[in-house]
Amino acid sequence: MNKEKEFLDFLLERFRIEKEKFDRSGVYAYTQRLLAYNSNKIEGSTLTEEQTASLFDNGTLPKSDDYYRAKDVEEMNGHFLMFNKMLDTLDEPLSQELIKQFHYELKSGVFEDRANGYAVGDYKQRPNMIGMYQTVRPENVEKEMNILMGWYFGQKINLDVLAEFHARYESIHPFQDGNVTQRHQQKAA
């Protein structure tokens, strides 16, 4: 066994042990807090690193004169759950069903997404955009995800392949979010 594989196995075992013991002092908690904070910050969350840590460590937010946006708290909690789902399914091959399960864990507790009728845990039903870029139309998502997954399983997985997978995945943007197309906004108005 090479050193890299040995270290990875050790790290994954630490994640599992610390998760099961509700250990908030080790690599599992550190990774949960750091990934949740950075991922949600990219999406516009207003929670700080300290607030994220408090939410993860004890389920509360520190007293503040500022307000907390419910969506930020709900998405942060969803991120924690999704990370746990990822740990629980590490031995399963990546599949569209598993990706949908991750999305469900991430978004099922977000009131705004449910109130907007988003397909939580399923592919989008309305067109959306990333910035000014049009993504794959809802009726083409499953086909494009099949193509992406076929490509992925034909690769020798390394960091370059994972980065390309992510870029291709984002261009499909298979799940609903608040970035709707202008045409959709005009129809809704």
Image (cartoon, rainbow, N blue to C red):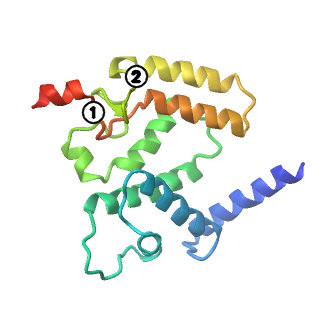
Mark pair 1, 2: CA separation = 12 Å
Residue 126 percent coordinates (x, y): 27, 27
Count all numbered tags in the image, as a single digit.
2
Which of 89/63 is in front? 63
Q: Point out which mark residue 54 bears.
A: none
Image coordinates for residue 3, horizontal then vertical, percent = 88, 53
Q: Mark on residue 180?
A: 1
Q: Which mark is residue 136?
A: 2
Side (left or right) of 8 relative to 17: right
How far from the left and from the top, in percent, is residue 89? 58, 46
Q: Secondary structure at mark 1?
A: loop
Name the quadrant containing residue 130: top left
Residue in the picture at 26% in, 45% down? 113
| Badge 2 amino acid | Val
Graded by Cα atoms within 10 Å as few (under 14), some (14 to 19) or many (20 or more), the crowding at tag 2 reads many
Q: Earlier in the sequence, mark 1 or mark 2?
A: 2
Task: Tell me the quarter of the picture where residue 118 sits.
Answer: top left
What's the residue at 83%, 54% (across, down)? Answer: 6
Q: Nearer the viewer, residue 17 or 121?
A: 121
Is residue 81 toward the left or the right of residue 15 in the image? left
Query: Residue drawn at (43%, 57%), measured in percent from left and top?
Result: 41
Is 22 above or below relative to 175?
below
| Residue found farthest to the left | 189
Q: Amino acid at mark 1?
A: Val
For the point 34% across and 18% down, which residue is it?
139
Secondary structure found at label 2: loop
Residue 60 x %, y % = 36, 76
Is 74 on the left or on the right of 187, as rendered? right
